[in-house]
Amino acid sequence: DAKTTQPNSMESNEEEPVHLPCNHSTISGTDYIHWYRQLPSQGPEYVIHGLTSNVNNRMASLAIAEDRKSSTLILHRATLRDAAVYYCILGSGSARQLTFGSGTQLTVLP
Amino acid sequence: NAGVTQTPKFRVLKTGQSMTLLCAQDMNHEYMYWYRQDPGMGLRLIHYSVGEGTTAKGEVPDGYNVSRLKKQNFLLGLESAAPSQTSVYFCASRYSGRGSYEQYFGPGTRLTVT
């Protein structure tokens, strides 16, 4: 399975944008890029996913490099509630399961 | 909709005891999953099911059994609990339709085996 590499931790100031990077140099052509986050003491929740084009939804934006070997999750205006572990996961379109790595712990400073 | 619910929320077992964790979803999802999460780690897949009456092994299946007798329920059993099974257990479900990739997670069951 293709692997992802994320920084262990990042900090951001409240109300500022946050860019969370993910490297996936061995991504295959059919792999989607999924992002989940896990708030303290909760189960993970879906954030966004994409294949080739940049994607936006109400929670975040996903910027995918042209060669697809890296991607960035963008939180446009961090709030204290966004403090969580963010997981970048690869999975093919037909994949029935996702493999979670250790993710990036985002700390939001007031 | 309640989404994905898990029973119980907390449990303490002695080594060798057995128990069953129940996951229920009311979204009519075909796929269901059981994960475990150890402190400071990501989630690891134990077993999953792609439909009623079917189950498959995930990354760490040893020591666990599962059953999916009804579409809305997915049970995880520990026949003889060991301290290494102390963990937080998450259940998830997902629609199987094309283009649908979002997994919905339950709140977790915190299990301690002494």
Image: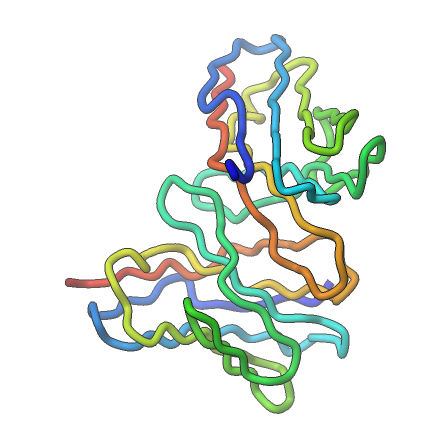
- In the image, A52 versus A106, the foreground residue is A52
- In the image, B92 versus A97, the foreground residue is B92
Residue A106 in the image: x percent, y percent? 34, 61
Instruction: Point out the image quarter for the C terminus of chain A.
Output: bottom left
Residue at 69%, 44% in the rendered image: B29
Residue B95 in the image: x percent, y percent? 69, 51
- Decide: is B12 above or below A104: above
Residue A104 in the image: x percent, y percent? 42, 61
For the image, the number of numbered tags is 0
- In the image, A10 versus A56, the foreground residue is A56
Instruction: Point out the image quarter for the N terminus of chain A.
Output: bottom right
State which quadrant residue A54 falls in. Answer: bottom right
In the displayed orientation, state which residue is furthest to the right: B53
Residue B107 in the image: x percent, y percent? 47, 36
In the displayed orientation, state which residue is furthest to the left: A110
Residue at 33%, 67% in the rendered image: A10
